[in-house]
Amino acid sequence: MYKHAIIRRPGKSSVRGLTSVDRGKPDFERLIEQHRHYTNTLSSLGLEVIELEALEEFPDACFTEDVAIVTPEVAVITRPGADSRRGETLHITDVLAKFRQLKYITEPGTIDGGDVLIIDQSCVKRHCIVGLSTRTNQSGAEQLCAILSEYGYQGDIVDLGADVPAALHFKSSVNFIDSHTLLVTQTCFWLDCLSAYRKLVVPEGEEYAANVVWINGKVLMPDGYPATQRLLEQNGFQTMVMPISEISKMDGGLTCLSLRLT
C-alpha cells in the first residue's frame, strides 16, 4: 500500500515541453485542472501528497517519476535521457532523502523512470524490468539493475526497438495492476521476462490505455478507452477514470505524474 506521493505542479512553461506526438498544444488552464484532479484522487486513496513548486526552467518537471526510481529500500536518482531534463534531478533529492537512502546513475548511463517497471511479489520475487529506449541506454539499465540486485531484485533488460515506435517509455506499454497481473499491449505480450505473469491485453486501437497506475486497490486509467475499462472491470479490477487529454499532448501518462512511496 502506498503512503506518500511526490508530485510537482506544472509550470506555465509546460506547454513548451518535449513531445514526440502531435496532439496539439496543451491548454495550460485545463492542464492545471487535470493535474489537480489527479492530486485530489491520490489524496482520496489515502496518500499524503507532497506537492513541489513548479520549475519554470524545466518544462517537463511535472513528470516526477522520470527523475527517480523508488523502491521500499532505496531511491535511485536517474540521469534523464533528454539533456534538457538532467537539471531536474537536483530538485528532487532533498525531499526523497527524507524517506530513502539515495543512489545515483552516472555517466555514460541514461535512464528515465518511465522505462522502469518494479514488481514486488513480496516473498516470491522482486522484479525490475528496464526497457531500452531513446531515453534509456544499456549503461543506465545495467547500473540500475546492479544497484537493485543488492536488495534482492531480479533485473531484466528488454529492447523493443522499432516494435513500439509510438511508445516513448516502456511503461507506455506494460504496467502492473496487481502483484501477479500486468496490463500490456499486444507487442509486449510475448516478452520472455513477463512469462510468469497473468497478462491482460489492451484492445487494438486503445494502446495508450496500457499506461495505468495501481494505487491502493484501484486502477487509475485514462478516460476515453471504454473497451479497456470493460476488460479490467470484467476481470475484477476497480477502475477510476482520469481526464488526461492535456497531459497526453506532452507525451505524459498517469504513471509519470508522481513518485509513489510505500
Image (cartoon, helix red, strand yellow):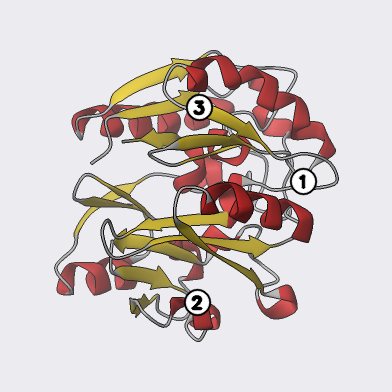
User: Along the line of sight, which residue is nearer the eye, 109 or 234?
Assistant: 109
Which sits earlier in the primary sequence, circle 3 or circle 1? 1
- Callout 1 amino acid: Gly
Percent across and percent down for residue 168 are 66, 58
Separation of disc 3 and disc 1 at Cα? 23 Å
Q: Residue at x 58, y 33 (%)?
A: 27
The span from disc 1 to disc 2 (Cα, nearest Å) is 24 Å
**Mark 2 neighbour density, 10 Å: few (under 14) some (14–19) many (20 or more):** some
Query: What residue type is disc 3 on?
Result: Gln
* Callout 1 secondary element: loop
Q: Nearer the viewer, mark 3 or mark 1?
A: 3
The secondary element bearing badge 2 is classed as helix
Q: Are marks 1 and 2 in contact (CB under 8 Å)?
A: no
Task: Write down the residue under mark 1.
Answer: 81
In the figure, residue 92 lies in which quadrant? Answer: top right
Q: Residue 177, image x and y in percent? A: 30, 61
CA gap, disc 2 to disc 3? 28 Å
Task: Quarter of the image for the N terminus: give it.
Answer: top left
The foreground one among 85 and 194 is 194
Question: To which residue does mark 2 refer?
Answer: 193
Crowdedness near tag 1: few (<14), some (14–19) or many (≥20) residues, C-alpha within 10 Å = some
Q: Are marks 3 and 1 in contact (CB under 8 Å)?
A: no
Task: Determine which residue is flagged by label 3.
Answer: 101
| Disc 2 residue type (three-letter) | Cys
